[in-house]
Amino acid sequence: MEDQRNIRWHHSTVTREQRERQNGHKGLTIWFTGLSASGKSTVANCLEEKLFKMGCHAMVLDGDNIRHGLNKNLGFSKDDREENIRRIGELAKLLTSKAIINIAAFISPYRADRATARALQDEGDFIEVFIKCPIEVCEKRDPKGLYQKARAGIIKDFTGVNDPYEEPEDPEVVIDTSLKDVDQCADEIIKYLERTRVLMGDPFEATL
């Protein structure tokens, strides 16, 4: 393993503040958590599209997409789930520092792992959005048939069936996707971003 003493952090000549002024919004990690089929990816992609149309620099970090590449060597054991979230937390921190609104859409079932991801960032740079949905509704949606396979014993360690999901205790935003459509859910998050001044106004050319 390479000697960690030879690795140093390199600072960009373009500051975060300059990027935020030019973008017209702050860098932020919006961390979605919720059961499989609760609507995380659907709402995340709708939110990304709405923010893009507003001129924001926003992107979704989707659980399945990340496991296709960056985390393709990880399984679904508790240790692998922890490492999966740790890596995403580090990536989210980097994107936030570059004034990007990154929307992390992961089951992330354990409170401790979500707390670790939050602790990586400064106060105000991380908001937790609980995508709330009764498991009965998630099972009816079940686009991948995962709950059925878990109930049949084909899939082991499946969150909500034979592995725990620990609901957030104090999330910044709670979205119940069983009661609202996708546009209403995304709009509710945008209202939060406006209220907390993440969205600062029209972008302008920063003096670099």
Image (cartoon, helix red, strand yellow):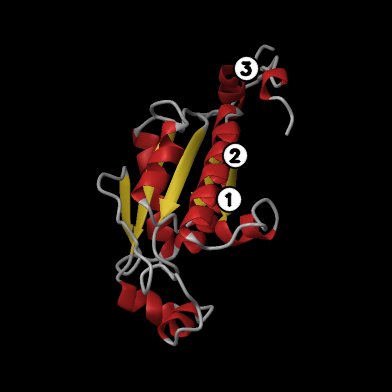
55 or 129: nearer the eye?
A: 129
Q: Position of residue 169 (x, y in %)?
A: 25, 48
1 or 55: nearer the eye?
A: 1
Q: Position of residue 13 (x, y in %)?
A: 70, 14
Farthest top residue?
207
Question: Three-letter amino acid code at disc 1?
Answer: Leu
Label 2 or label 3, whichever comes before in sequence order: 3
Label 2 or label 1, whichever comes before in sequence order: 1
Q: Position of residue 174 (x, y in %)?
A: 30, 52
Residue 128 image-quadrant placement: top left
Q: Which residue is mark 3?
A: 15
Q: Which residue is mark 1?
A: 61
Circle 2 sits in a helix, a strand or a loop, which is it?
helix
As drawn, is 134 to the left or to the right of 67? left
At x 60%, y 62%, the residue is: 64
Farthest bottom residue?
152
**Vertical relation: 192 (above or below) 186:** above
As drawn, is 18 to the left or to the right of 175? right
**Vertical relation: 6 (above or below) 174:** above
Circle 3 sits in a helix, a strand or a loop, which is it?
loop
Crowding at label 1, few (<14), some or many (≥20) Cα neighbours within 10 Å?
many
132 or 158: nearer the eye?
A: 158
Which disc number belongs to residue 91? 2
**Inter-mark Cα distance, 2 to 3:** 18 Å
Crowding at label 2, few (<14), some or many (≥20) Cα neighbours within 10 Å?
some
